Image (cartoon, helix red, strand yellow):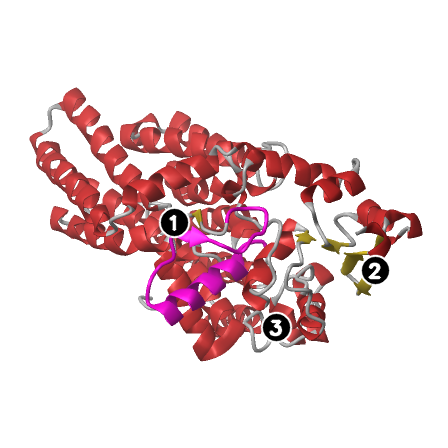
Amino acid sequence: RRGLLSLTHLWFLAALLLAAAAGALMPIEQVDFWWHLALGRAIAQTGSVPTTSSQSWVLPPATPFIYGSWLAEWLFFQLYQRGGLPLLVLTRNLLLLALLALVGLEARRRGAGWRLAALAVAGAGLTLLNNVSVRPQICAWLPFALTLLLLGAARQGQLPPRALLALPLLLVVWVNVHGTFVLGLALVGLTAAGASLTYLLHRDHERRARLTWLWAITAACAAAMLINPRVADIALFVRNLVFHPAAQGGGEWQRTDLLSYPGFLLPLALLLIAIGWYRRPERFDLTDALILAVFTWFGWSAIRSLIWFAIVAWPIAAGALAPPARPARQRIEIPALNYAILGLLLLVWTLTQPPLKPLLPLPPALAGLGARVPDGWLIGANTPVQAVAWLKQHPLPPDARLFNDLTYGSYLIWAAPEIKIAADGRLELYPLEHWITYAAIMRDEQALARLDQLGATHAMLSRERSPELVARLQSPASGWRELYRDETTAIFARSEAAR
């Protein structure tokens, strides 16, 4: 019956709500969120976007830096002022739910049934689960998915070509919220290029009309990006970040390991697409293949880029695997039971939201700092909230040079901007030589001598990430003395005898 919630629908809704609930459980990681929030505060207070960075004592006082996500950072601070961290996290969770719904909608547009749309949502959800922290990137999720959906629908004649006029408008916002706006232009350009190749092969006049629209919209999108006068600098900044030697050495910018999670989901999606196209060659689409090739390389080149591959690839996989259309089989449905299951799924998603999350018996990795600090359930367990609070109560000397774990730098910029730091998650901001020295110190390789060479007067270290270095500074012979220690963090000062 029309309007009946069927068991087939529940497959999709279960994948959607459970994947969104899993992402909602992820606490805020401190590597870069806090400096983004601090920048939003600075923009709100001064009414202008900074062009330099002055938070580190190892760099010149006015080191040039490109803040390409200024609008997202300003929006973050506005949300924070109105609802604190809970409102920021809730916004992330709603954007994630909308993104996964668009992935399912794209799969459906490609002819997939509700179960295969559930596969697309589950595959995409699992792939991006390690990359859902609150950061400006979340503001690019919907522009990317909507661009993909609109392009595909217009190319296949499911929407009139004039619907593509929305794309330049999306780019106007996108170019100011995150550097991935270049992916939007890439999607449009690749679609136009693929449609051109298809036209050359088939000489279909109907395709030619759509082709004219695609190239016109590509030009309009390129022009729309100029709304941000620093668009060329931002694009160069993104390129330099992706290929920065320090970024390539580890973390989220290192090459994707295809044999571990979430990397193995990349070849799995490609395998499913290959199976679908092999079984039904008529579903092979040259434009899809071109886009897929580019985003496969992009997803393989860096773990952080897997999210964009997933949004592209899993709907293609669902559409490729869809069986031929056939009359629906009559099934016995129990509407009351179906709606009860939906209610349970909605309850699970609701319980993962900020006000209710503390009610769940979560493991430490998801519970964050817990009840130890306000909003602790939303903050990653390695965020030095208590240590920085202690520093605020026991100020360092004005000329202090704090050597810090780079993961602490972002939170220090937000919570204690008066303290100059030695490192933070903006790898591209610091010269490679500094990261070589930093890595050697953290590995406890001639750490005391290197700290002397840097001129560090204080140190703030993670007891979990660098236990050997913490033990070395705790030694009476080190020339350092411990000022503070909690479950995660230790703070040291150079002793008078060592000065």
Element assignment for label 3:
helix
Element assignment for label 1:
loop
Report the mark closest to the observer, 3 or 1: 3
Q: Is residue 230 left or right of residue 67?
A: left
Nearer the N terminus, badge 2 or badge 1?
1
Q: Give the distance between the C-alpha atoms of the residues marked 3 and 1, in whole angstroms.
A: 33 Å
Q: Give the distance between the C-alpha atoms of the residues marked 2 and 3, in whole angstroms.
A: 36 Å
Report the mark closest to the observer, 2 or 1: 2
Q: Which class describes the residues within 10 Å of circle 2: few (<14), some (14-19), or many (20+)? A: some
Q: Is residue 190 left or right of residue 271?
A: left
Is residue 24 among the parts visible in the rendering? yes
Q: Could you tell me residue 404's position as x and y percent? A: 68, 53
Q: Residue at x 43, y 36 (%)?
A: 240
Q: Which class describes the residues within 10 Å of circle 3: few (<14), some (14-19), or many (20+)? A: some
Nearer the N terminus, badge 3 or badge 1?
1
Residue 487 falls in image quadrant: bottom right
Q: Which mark is residue 113?
A: 1
Q: Could you tell me residue 195's position as x and y percent? A: 20, 31
Q: Which mark is residue 482?
A: 2
Q: Amino acid at mark 1?
A: Gly
Give the magenta part as a residue range.
31-60
Report the mark closest to the observer, 2 or 3: 2
Q: Which class describes the residues within 10 Å of circle 1: few (<14), some (14-19), or many (20+)? A: many
Near-viewer residue (84 or 409): 409
Nearer the N terminus, badge 2 or badge 3?
3
Residue 202 in the image: above or below residue 95: above
Is residue 338 among the parts visible in the rendering? no
